[in-house]
Image (spheres, helix red, strand yellow):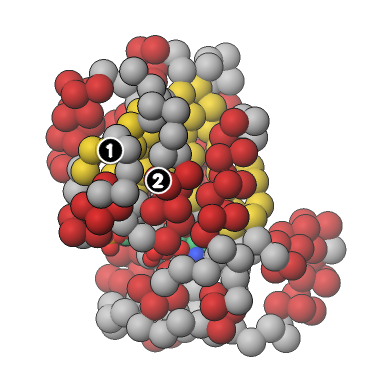
Amino acid sequence: MGNIIWITGAGSGIGKALALAYNKDNNTIILSGRKESQLNEVAAILKSSYVLPLDVTDELIIQNAVKQVDSKFGKVDILINNAGVSQRALVSETNNEVGRQLMEVNFFGSIHLTKAVLPLMQKSNAGSIVAMSSAAGKFGFPLRSYYAASKHALHGWYEALGLELKDTNIHVMIVCPGRIKTNISKNALIGNGEVHAEMDPGQESGISVEKCASAILRGIRNKKHEIYIGGSEVLMIYFKRYAPWLFRFIAKRVSAK
Ligand SMILES: NC(=O)c1ccc[n+]([C@@H]2O[C@H](COP(=O)([O-])OP(=O)(O)OC[C@H]3O[C@@H](n4cnc5c(N)ncnc54)[C@H](OP(=O)(O)O)[C@@H]3O)[C@@H](O)[C@H]2O)c1
């Protein structure tokens, strides 16, 4: 049997590109997300796949999905927690419920699935776990308060997990993309929970999903712990770390779309 690779948010954007990039070497790709029709479209172009629709915010569904994967494949070699939703609204405009929903998908959805898959990896003492953060997981940015908070939270949790697993063969990696050309801004939530439905200019000028996927595959292959992917916007991560004043100088002047 080849590798079993489980990707959430696999019906679109970066998740779909990851599924296509892993479509080789006897790999079987488990495709998860809420929209079954999109997952089926991706499955139709893959050599070996298994469509497993789920909502990452539903803990019971996650438990059942992991049982299903265990009985069908008996292992997960790579888990990519890619499902996520962004935000385009000021703090003052964002309902608390919407903020909570962003945390549920981006943070709790990711960690609950990881926690449920972990025993399978521990059984074979092997595997890679990937958490999809963002450049907004390294610094805050206007209109993305809860999104940035949810992505920052991933860093604390996954870093702790990676250290707890230091003496095992289970690898944990956090991915921080800058701007990748997907529909993430269209699918982002505004303050009342409706979708933003607009392609941001920054998103439109982002790097391709194919480039992003191949950088993630490279990171997994080389057992990296944290990777940054994108164009010049990724420099802001380094400014924030080494010259916080420069980060603020630039961030205050960037149009927050
Ligand atoms: N594009 C960028 O510039 C960028 C930058 C930094 C980080 N990221 C991160 O990259 C990841 C992928 O985003 P993308 O750019 O590819 O945008 P996207 O096309 O909107 O993909 C998001 C995916 O998440 C899935 N999803 C959302 N809510 C879900 C839920 N409750 N349960 C299960 N799946 C859910 C969606 O599928 P369904 O609607 O079918 O559920 C969709 O396939 C996200 O975590 C995002 O935060 C993207």
| Location of residue 89 with respect to 20 vertically, above or below | below
Residue located at (59% from left, 31% from top): 221
* Quarter of image, ligand 1: bottom left
- Please identify the quarter of the rendering in which residue 208 is found: bottom right
Q: CA distance from mark 1 to mark 2?
A: 9 Å
Between 24 and 205, the one nearer to me in the picture: 24
Query: How many other residues sit within 10 Å of disc 1, few (<14), some (14-19) or many (≥20)?
Result: many
Between 135 and 97, the one nearer to me in the picture: 135
* Rendering coords of residue 3 (x, y %): 40, 25
Residue located at (36% from left, 73% from top): 187
Kindly tell me whether mark 2's CB lies below 8 Å from ligand 1: no
Q: Which image quarter is the N terminus in? A: top left
* Rendering coords of residue 157 (x, y %): 49, 41
Q: Are marks 1 and 2 in contact (CB under 8 Å)?
A: yes
Q: Is residue 115 visible?
A: no
* Rendering coords of residue 121 (x, y %): 39, 20
Q: Amino acid at mark 1?
A: Ser
Between 155 and 216, the one nearer to me in the picture: 216
Q: Is residue 221 visible?
A: yes
Residue located at (74% from left, 67% from top): 232
Between 113 and 218, the one nearer to me in the picture: 218
- Callout 2: helix, strand or loop? helix
* Rendering coords of residue 40 (x, y %): 21, 52
Q: Which residue is mark 1?
A: 49
Answer with left or right where residue 243 lies relative to residue 125: right
Answer with left or right where residue 245 lies relative to residue 64: right
- Please identify the quarter of the rendering in which residue 171 is found: top right
Q: Tag on residue 226?
A: none
Q: Which residue is mark 2?
A: 19
| Location of residue 206 with respect to 39 vertically, above or below | below
